[in-house]
Image (cartoon, rainbow, N blue to C red):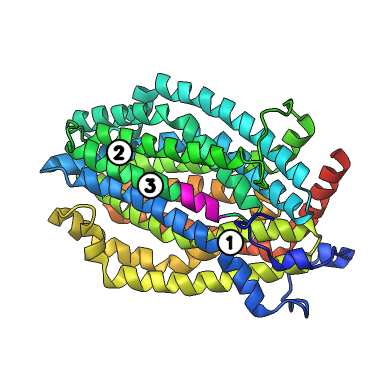
């Protein structure tokens, strides 16, 4: 086993032969086996989650630094620059949906094969996912370049977004597309390593990439060390330089023969329809989930953009802060996905439930700490991005609302992560269709366009989305249906393998 991998309690437990009642029944509170202490359970969770947390925080801090650094441009240029960068975000993520779907499917299957200690099959899943994602990302890079102007103009809505903001947004998006293939390559490697419980190596290469990004921001946005001041254009180039650094290091990791996840160019490659279909069984519903989510977010974001540069820039700052609050929940969700997959790989349905309950406990504690931070330092947090008094006055009260949602937000992230680890991705797709596309975008249109509640309408709609998603995810998990679905899916995988 690589030193970077986490050895969990699952490795020391025998395969189980669960009864039909265990598989088909609801989730019950269970005590861990006598050989597994509570300390070991929490250690397993934290050892997988903490490198993922640091990686996510550093990545989000870099994204926030991009906004803060372009937002520090003098006068109205800073507000307009934040809006320009924000216009490109949702179209870029929309183009990544298929790649992200492959990553979700490969993580779940690799975790399952890691639980079975079947390195060969884990690596074959990775090879199929990597080659497919490189081809897919190259195709969607071309799509993005061809339709850049239309996408950004559409995102600008019909409101008060200025021509200069749209022009900079198109420029930023075009440059971002040049780094699309390296970005997706890094995502694929990270997803595979996460499946085997290795979150330390992605932490290393993503940290290095973020440092490069920040340094290049300083040089290229403001014009330092002989480089001309490029503003928004400089921020775009700095981002793809950092992403390319991450991709190069990630590739070097999987090319090492000693790596558990290994890509060998000397081995003859051919597409394996069976493995691809197995990945697709989990990944395609995740892709649908992402499409629903992105469609909803595009409608929602476009509606907010129609409120003008100032409100839209304030909203983007608040969204960046919310994204930072996501990090703890996402890190624990990654741990839940890995531990759920590995537990089910050994047919340990008891351990899957035990790990989920402990992960939820950790998530609640950390989310309460985040809530307190948002309440106590709301003005100071917003002023990091932009010191315009109108921006701070508009955004600070909304952070109080965001603080109240933190425990619910963490709970739904972790529960969704566990369901994905079990392969129950169709339900999560349905939940996102209902909450993001239906509630957030629908209520957002109602509150902003009809009731004219401005930014408050946008965030009431967002909070309503989060609360409903928490309820629906929790109901699904506690029903126990994911256990039967996992058993059926893994049985089909075994029969096809």
Are circles 1 and 2 on residues that touch, CB within 8 Å?
no
In x, y percent, where is residue 16? Answer: 86, 65
Secondary structure category for the residue under label 1: helix
Residue 291 in sight from this viewpoint: no
Marker disc for residue 85:
2
In x, y percent, where is residue 385? Answer: 23, 53
Q: Residue at the top extreme?
A: 146
Of callouts 3 and 2, which one flags the residue occurring earlier in the amino acid sequence?
A: 2
For image coordinates 17% across by 33% down, the residue present is 226
* Residue matched to label 1: 48
Q: Is residue 468 left or right of residue 336?
A: left
The boundaries of the magenta stretch are: 199-205
For image coordinates 21% across by 35% down, the residue present is 231
In x, y percent, where is residue 246? Answer: 46, 41
Q: Which of the two residues, 292 or 446, is positioned nearer the viewer here?
A: 292
Query: In which quadrant is the C terminus drawn?
Result: top right
Q: Is residue 379 above or below residue 444?
A: below
* Residue matched to label 3: 210
In x, y percent, where is residue 97? Answer: 54, 37
Q: Nearer the viewer, mark 1 or mark 2?
A: 1
Q: Is residue 203 magenta?
A: yes
Residue 125 in sight from this viewpoint: yes
Q: Could you give the CA–CA distance between mark 1 and mark 3, rounded to whole angstroms?
A: 21 Å
Q: Could you give the CA–CA distance between mark 3 and mark 2, rounded to whole angstroms?
A: 17 Å
Q: Nearer the viewer, mark 3 or mark 2?
A: 3
Of callouts 1 and 2, which one flags the residue occurring earlier in the amino acid sequence?
A: 1
Q: Is residue 436 magenta?
A: no
Query: In which quadrant is the N terminus drawn?
Result: bottom right
Q: Which of the two residues, 285 or 331, is positioned nearer the viewer here?
A: 331
Packing grade of label 3 (10 A; few <14, some 14-19, many >=20) is: many
């Amino acid at each position: 086993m690589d030193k970077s991998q986490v050895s969990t309690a699952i490795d020391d437990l025998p395969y189980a032969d669960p009864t039909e009642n265990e598989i088909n029944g609801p989730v019950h509170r269970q005590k861990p086996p006598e050989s597994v202490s509570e300390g070991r359970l929490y250690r397993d969770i934290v050892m997988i989650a903490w490198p993922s947390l640091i990686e996510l925080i550093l990545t989000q801090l870099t994204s926030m630094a991009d906004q803060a650094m372009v937002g520090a441009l003098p006068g109205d240029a800073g507000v307009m620059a934040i809006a320009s960068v924000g216009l490109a975000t949702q179209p870029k993520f929309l183009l990544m949906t298929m790649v992200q779907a492959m990553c979700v499917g490969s993580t779940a299957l690799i975790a399952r094969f890691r639980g079975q200690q079947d390195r060969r099959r884990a690596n074959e899943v990775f090879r199929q996912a990597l080659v497919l994602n490189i081809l897919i990302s190259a195709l969607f890079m071309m799509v993005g370049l061809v339709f850049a102007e239309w996408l950004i103009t559409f995102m600008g809505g019909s409101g008060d977004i200025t021509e200069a903001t749209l022009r900079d947004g198109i420029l930023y998006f075009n440059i971002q597309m040049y780094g699309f293939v390296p970005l997706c390559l890094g995502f694929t490697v990270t997803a595979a390593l996460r499946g085997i419980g290795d979150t330390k190596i992605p932490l290393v290469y993503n940290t290095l990439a973020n440092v490069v990004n920040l340094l290049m921001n300083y040089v290229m946005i403001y014009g330092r060390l002989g480089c001309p001041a490029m503003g928004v254009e400089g921020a775009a180039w700095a981002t793809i330089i950092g992403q390319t650094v991450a991709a190069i290091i990630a590739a070097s990791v999987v090319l090492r023969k000693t790596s558990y996840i290994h890509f060998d160019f000397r081995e003859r490659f051919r597409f394996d329809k069976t493995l691809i279909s197995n990945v697709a069984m989990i990944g395609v519903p995740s892709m649908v989930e992402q499409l629903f989510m992105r469609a909803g977010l595009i409608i929602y974001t476009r509606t907010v953009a129609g409120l003008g540069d100032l409100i839209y820039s304030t909203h983007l700052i608040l969204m960046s802060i919310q994204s930072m609050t996501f990090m703890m929940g996402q890190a624990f969700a990654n741990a839940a996905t890995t531990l759920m997959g590995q537990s089910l790989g050994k047919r340990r349905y008891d351990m899957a439930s035990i790990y989920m309950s402990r992960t939820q406990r950790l998530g609640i504690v950390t989310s309460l700490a985040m809530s307190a931070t948002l309440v106590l330092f709301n003005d100071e947090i917003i002023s990091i991005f932009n010191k315009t008094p109108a921006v701070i006055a508009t955004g600070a009260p909304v952070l109080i609302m965001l603080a109240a949602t933190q425990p619910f937000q963490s709970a739904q992230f972790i529960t969704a992560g566990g369901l994905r680890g079990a392969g129950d991705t169709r339900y999560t797709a349905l939940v996102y269709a209902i909450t993001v596309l239906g509630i957030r975008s629908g209520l957002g249109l109602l509150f902003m366009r009809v009731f004219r509640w401005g930014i408050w309408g946008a965030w009431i709609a967002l909070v309503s989305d989060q609360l409903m998603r928490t309820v629906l995810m929790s109901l699904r998990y506690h029903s126990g249906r994911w256990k039967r679905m996992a058993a059926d899916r893994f049985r089909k995988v075994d029969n096809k393998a």
